[in-house]
Each structure stands twice: as structure tokens, then as C-alpha cells.
Image (tube, grey):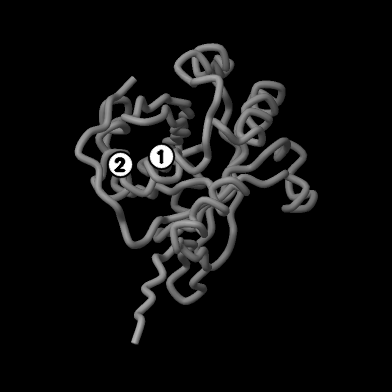
Amino acid sequence: MTNIIQLNPSSHIPLGLLLPAAEYGPANPRFRGFVLEQPVEFDPLSCANAHRSRFSALVIDGPRTPMLLLVIQLGDAVLSWLADPAEPAVWSAIGSWNTNGSVSVALSCEKTHLFVIPLTRRIDKTTLLRPVKPVQSSAIFTNQAIEVFSTGAVNEVIAAHFAAGSKSSHCVIHTEGVATALAHQGYQAEYDSKANKFVARKSLLVSL
């Protein structure tokens, strides 16, 4: 596990999604369970013929709460999704990936491209759950996630486990609990179609 220190808030947070495969239609019979999705700034087709792919689920031991980091290396691209351990859908997704023996991924840049990453071994939910406290709070997770993206701590964690890629993209999974916590802190989630970004931006209210 990795301890994170020197955290500061950020004015915008990159977001990703965790959706049922049915949302994408019958695109591929192997595309099952839950899907990790995020917009990227590179053409996902550049990863279509990748000779290597790897998935890893890591635990980040933050100062206030543990967090899950789901990382995929697809060719020379490294992608990650910071996940809330208090969200039941996250654990349901991990269970579905173990059942299917693969992780389904959707990367979008103008068009959405689907990938299936084989699991070389089952994701050990017991190991992931061990540092997670019995009572988790999406609000605490979200506060810490905001700070993590301000410091680049996610990059440090990934660098300890993965070789550097020429392309990278990182986000927080926008679950119901995270959405509520972001709204309470004055963030608004929005998709910018021109920039191809799904982000939570800090609302700046000025009283006159």
C-alpha cells in the first residue's frame, strides 16, 4: 500500500464511469459485466493492436480513508480509475470481472472504442477489503480524491507498479455517492463535448 501526504484541493476533477455492459448494446459477446469508461485525449484505436495488456487493483492507504485504484496498461497507454470502497457497485463490478475472467473497458475520443482485458489471475477481494474500515464514507473518499488529483499522487502510485507509458489518463469513478459528495462541495459534473472531457468543476459563487 502507498501512503499519501501533502494533499491540497483542486478546482476540477476528471471523472469516469462504471456502467453495465448492456448500456453498450450487443457489441461483443465477451463484453460483459461492468464496464470501466473514461474519455481520453488520444485515439483509442492506437491501442487496438496492443501486444500487452494488464489490469491491477491497488489499495491506496490515504490519511483519512483507503481508496481503490483500478489500473490498466494497454500497449503504451496507462489508464486508471480511482474507486470509492463505500460504493457497492464497485465490489459488484470486481465480482463480475472475476466471473468473466476479464475486465471490459470503454475509451472515448470522438467515438467510443471497446476493449476486453483478460485477467491473468482473480482479483483478491479479501486482500482489497482488509484495509477498508467497516464504516466507509463517500464524502471522506471524495474529499481525499479531490486532494489526490491536486498533487499527482496517483501518478506516483502507478509509477511504483507500472512502466511509464507514452499515453496516460486518470479519473475518479462518478458513482452516486461521489456525485452527492461533489455537489455538497460546490462541484458540478459536466461533459464538455468539444474538449472530450467529463469533469467536476468547482462552482465559484460571488456575492455582490
Residues marked 1 and 2 touching at CB (< 8 Å): yes
The location of residue 206, given as percent across then percent down, is 35, 80
Quarter in which the N terminus is drawn: top left
Kindly state the secondary structure of the residue where label 1 is placed: loop
**Could you tell whether 199 is left or right of 31 in the image?**
left
Looking at the picture, tell me which residue is in the foreground, 25 or 179.
179
The location of residue 17, given as percent across then percent down, is 58, 50
Residue shown at 48% from the left, 54% from the top: 15
The location of residue 115, given as percent across then percent down, is 59, 43
> What residue did someone put label 2 on?
165
**In the picture shown, does residue 205 fall above or below 187?**
below
Looking at the picture, tell me which residue is in the foreground, 151 or 197.
151
The location of residue 148, given as percent across then percent down, is 32, 43
**In the picture shown, does residue 165 fall above or below 64?**
below
Give the class, few, some or many, for how many residues have Cα within 10 Å of label 1's Cα (few <14, many ≥20): some
Q: Label 1 to label 2, Cα distance in Å?
A: 8 Å
Q: Which of the numbered marks, if any, corresponds to residue 75?
A: 1
Looking at the picture, tell me which residue is in the foreground, 51 or 169.
169
**In the picture shown, does residue 70 fall above or below 12?**
above
Residue shown at 45% from the left, 45% from the top: 142
Choose the circle earlier in sequence order: 1 or 2.
1
